[in-house]
Every structure is written in structure tokens, then in C-alpha cells.
Image (cartoon, helix red, strand yellow):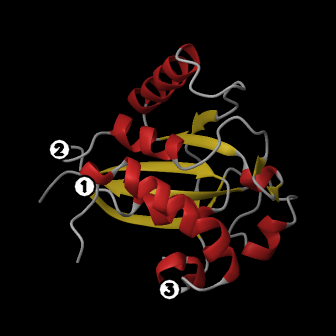
């Protein structure tokens, strides 16, 4: 059995991040959930208040022999705007912050190095505000949030926000995507 690693990433609404990262070769799962807050077992309604301190995140399980952590992070940075504090588009609040929750000192070093590299390359006009913190407890989101885009492609938010992000992601990451089923 292949050895797997975990990445926990928040980049705004988890539906976009989860929808994109689950398509990468080597990713065995992408679970939407919550992390970084003070309440145990928060609900979506709790997190949406912005008072729990949780971020909407995606916990990704991947095979590092197929896709490395740095590539997962690069894909993550390509699917959201890491320069807006507590915001992604019209989604505003601390629950939508850009955050990398690391699971090892190696992951922390990789995240910090990539952020420094992207900053030096001036990939974005504004500074990267992505937080890098040790991974706290992860709470899976409610069942209806899992694989949300695939299950609800005609829902308004999916059509207006998720679909265009996924189309752009698929074009940029075509060589790293799982074969079409």
C-alpha cells in the first residue's frame, strides 16, 4: 500500500478548493471541513458567523510518490487569491482566509519557501497574506458539503463561481489531472 500524506488548506469557500484538488493525480481524497477555531465540532452555521475562528478548509490525502506537497501547494495557490485578507471574491470573513495548516516541520519549510519564491517572482500585485500554522484539529463538514460541485453543478454559486475557477484550473493543470472517467 502506498504511503500517503495529508495537506490541510483554506482558500475561501471550500467547494472551489475541494473541487480542484480532488482532480489531481495522486490525490486519493479531498474532504471539506473546518480548522483553526476554538469550538469543537462546529457546524457550517457556526462557522459562517465568523465567531468560531475556524476557516473553511480542505483536507487532502495524497501519495507523495505521485504528487509532492509543493505541487499540491502550487495548485492550491492557483485556485484562490492569496493576497486578500479574510476574503475570496464576495465571500468575506475570517472563515474565508487563506491558510496552510502544516502537518510537519518539512511541510512548514516547504510552504514558507514557496511563499517566499512567489513573493520574489511578484506573481501577484499585492503581498501574499496566506497564514502558515501547525495543523489543529480538523472537523469534516456536513455530508452535503462533500464533493459539492460534482453533486450540485447547476446550483447558482457553483455556476457563477466554482465552474469558472475549475475551468481555469483544469486548463492550467491539465498535465497533472486524473484521466477523465
Say whether marks 1 and 2 touch (CB < 8 Å): yes
Closer to us: 113 or 36 = 113
Q: How many marks?
A: 3
Q: Which residue is mark 2?
A: 65
Q: Which mark is residue 151?
A: 3
How many other residues sit within 10 Å of disc 1, few (<14), some (14-19) or many (≥20)? many
Residue 37 placement (x, y as % from top left): 74, 53
Q: Which residue is mark 1?
A: 26
Residue drawn where x is 54% and y is 78% of the image: 148
Q: Earlier in the sequence, mark 1 or mark 3?
A: 1
**Label 3's element?**
helix
Position of residue 181 in the picture relative to residue 128 (left or right): left
Residue drawn where x is 83% and y is 53% of the image: 93
Residue 161 placement (x, y as % from top left): 65, 66
Whether residue 33 can be seen here: no
**Figure check: 138 above or below 142:** above
Residue 5 placement (x, y as % from top left): 32, 48
- Label 2 and label 3: CA atoms lie apart by 30 Å
How many other residues sit within 10 Å of disc 3, few (<14), some (14-19) or many (≥20)? few
**Figure check: 172 above or below 153:** above
**Label 1's element?**
loop
**Outermost left residue:** 1
Position of residue 11 in the picture relative to residue 1 (left or right): right
Residue drawn where x is 44% and y is 40% of the image: 73
**Figure check: 73 above or below 12:** above
**Foreground mark, 1 or 3?**
3
The image quarter containing residue 28 is bottom left
- Label 1 and label 3: CA atoms lie apart by 22 Å
Q: Earlier in the sequence, mark 1 or mark 2?
A: 1
- Label 1 and label 2: CA atoms lie apart by 8 Å
Closer to us: 159 or 25 = 159
Q: Earlier in the sequence, mark 2 or mark 3?
A: 2
Amino acid at each position: 500500500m502506498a504511503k500517503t500524506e495529508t495537506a490541510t488548506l483554506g482558500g475561501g469557500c471550500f467547494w472551489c478548493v475541494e473541487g480542484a484538488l480532488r482532480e489531481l493525480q495522486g490525490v486519493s481524497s479531498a474532504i471539506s471541513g473546518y480548522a483553526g477555531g476554538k469550538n469543537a465540532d462546529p457546524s457550517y452555521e457556526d462557522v459562517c458567523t465568523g465567531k468560531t475562528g475556524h476557516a473553511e478548509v480542505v483536507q487532502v490525502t495524497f501519495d507523495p510518490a505521485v504528487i509532492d506537497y509543493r505541487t499540491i501547494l502550487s495548485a492550491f495557490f492557483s485556485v484562490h487569491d492569496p493576497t486578500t485578507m479574510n476574503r475570496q471574491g464576495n465571500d468575506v470573513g475570517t472563515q474565508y482566509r487563506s491558510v496552510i495548516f502544516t502537518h510537519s516541520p518539512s511541510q512548514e519549510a516547504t510552504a514558507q519557501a514557496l511563499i517566499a519564491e512567489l513573493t520574489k517572482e511578484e506573481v501577484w500585485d499585492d503581498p501574499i497574506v496566506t497564514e502558515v500554522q501547525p495543523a489543529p484539529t480538523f472537523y469534516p463538514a456536513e455530508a452535503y458539503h462533500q464533493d459539492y460541485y460534482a453533486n450540485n453543478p447547476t446550483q447558482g454559486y457553483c455556476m457563477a463561481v466554482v465552474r469558472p475557477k475549475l475551468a481555469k484550473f483544469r486548463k492550467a493543470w491539465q498535465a497533472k489531472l486524473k484521466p477523465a472517467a
